[in-house]
Image: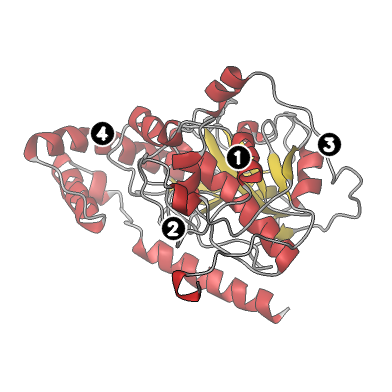
Amino acid sequence: MEAGKIFLILLSLAMVFGLVNSLEFTEKDIASEENLWDLYQKWRSHHTVSRDLTEKQKRFNVFKVNVMHIHNVNKMDRPYKLKLNKFADMTNHEFRNFYSSKIKHFRMLHGPRPTTGFMHEKADNLPASVDWRKKGAVTGVKDQGKCGSCWAFSTIVGVEGINKIKTGKLVSLSEQELVDCEKDNEGCNGGLMENAYEFIKKNGGVTTEKIYPYKASDSRCDSSKRNSPVVNIDGHEMVPEKDEDALMKAVANQPISVAIDASGSDLQFYSEGVFNGNCGTELDHGVAVVGYGSTHDGTKYWIVKNSWGTEWGEQGYFRMQRGIDAEEGLCGITMEASYPVKLSPDNPKPAPSKDEL
């Protein structure tokens, strides 16, 4: 209970700090071209973005369009808000190209979604809310950078979570090992979480972030680091698709990898609140559901961990509306959900250091 209270206090402080650090703007800032230019200069300084003169003018034109979109959406009576974040001088097309994991493309490439068992099928009496962060099963928010490796981050959240649940220890694990060494996916060019889970099982585990740190680029697989696994799994299962109740059963038991359609401008600039904006089912981004709950007015939501750094969203998280009419869930969240299976707390023993030999 005490740990939960401390977590809530820290989360509240972090969110306040995050809002203070975001670049706010007023009607006056967008009243003229000159004022908009000043706002762009402030934004560049705030995010330490350097551009040459030609590029700066081009980016300013993009920035203006994005500022007006953010301003117009925030004037609407929606349960979420947008802000000028680090993506503010990128077109939506550029944004999608840099951060997309091309989930739908890889699904078509690898054939139909596999059918597996679902160990959480009989889960009942589910709690009204769950937050695996409060239970210490979620590491800090990470940043994939300009690399379409969100599939690796989504997978690692699942493994870090189940390892904490089974062993009581939270260990930050290596996304870069998956990017470099998992050959059924294509590193920064995207992939599927289920392939990554299968790789971890066959490889005898995955190593730590510390041993194999993230580079935000494709590199040659480092076999010595790959051969130093610290956390293993026994396989993975798919959550029955197009079924929010099944996803809720799974999330009540562990953090879950999901894919969503994150291509819209509203998610690009999401700041806070329960997202219920327009999105389709062209799945292009891997994230992880680490809990669920509802607001004071009864709006149900999923708690989703993203991999775009802590400056985006609610300190790197977003809340997405849950319990909508469409069976695929908002942005297709129920279509590609999966999770790792770990049957025991046993993990690979670390290799002895050379000093011990």
> Which amino acid, mark 3?
Gly
Few, some or many C-alpha atoms within 10 Å of disc 4 (few <14, some 14-19, many ≥20)?
Answer: some
Q: In the rendered structure, which disc, 1 or 4, sits on the residue that comes first in sequence?
A: 4
Q: Cβ–Cβ below 8 Å for labels 4 and 3?
A: no
Few, some or many C-alpha atoms within 10 Å of disc 1 (few <14, some 14-19, many ≥20)?
Answer: many
Residue 354: tell me if it is visible. Answer: yes
Q: Which mark is residue 199?
A: 1
Q: Name the residue that disc number 4 marks.
A: 62
Q: How far apart are marks 4 and 3 (CA)?
A: 47 Å
Q: Cβ–Cβ below 8 Å for labels 2 and 4?
A: no
Q: Distance between the residues labelled 3 and 1?
A: 19 Å
Few, some or many C-alpha atoms within 10 Å of disc 3 (few <14, some 14-19, many ≥20)?
Answer: few
Viewer-side residue, 204 vs 301: 204
Q: In the rendered structure, which disc, 2 or 1, sits on the residue that comes first in sequence?
A: 1
Viewer-side residue, 77 vs 100: 100
Q: Which of marks 2 and 1 is in front?
A: 1
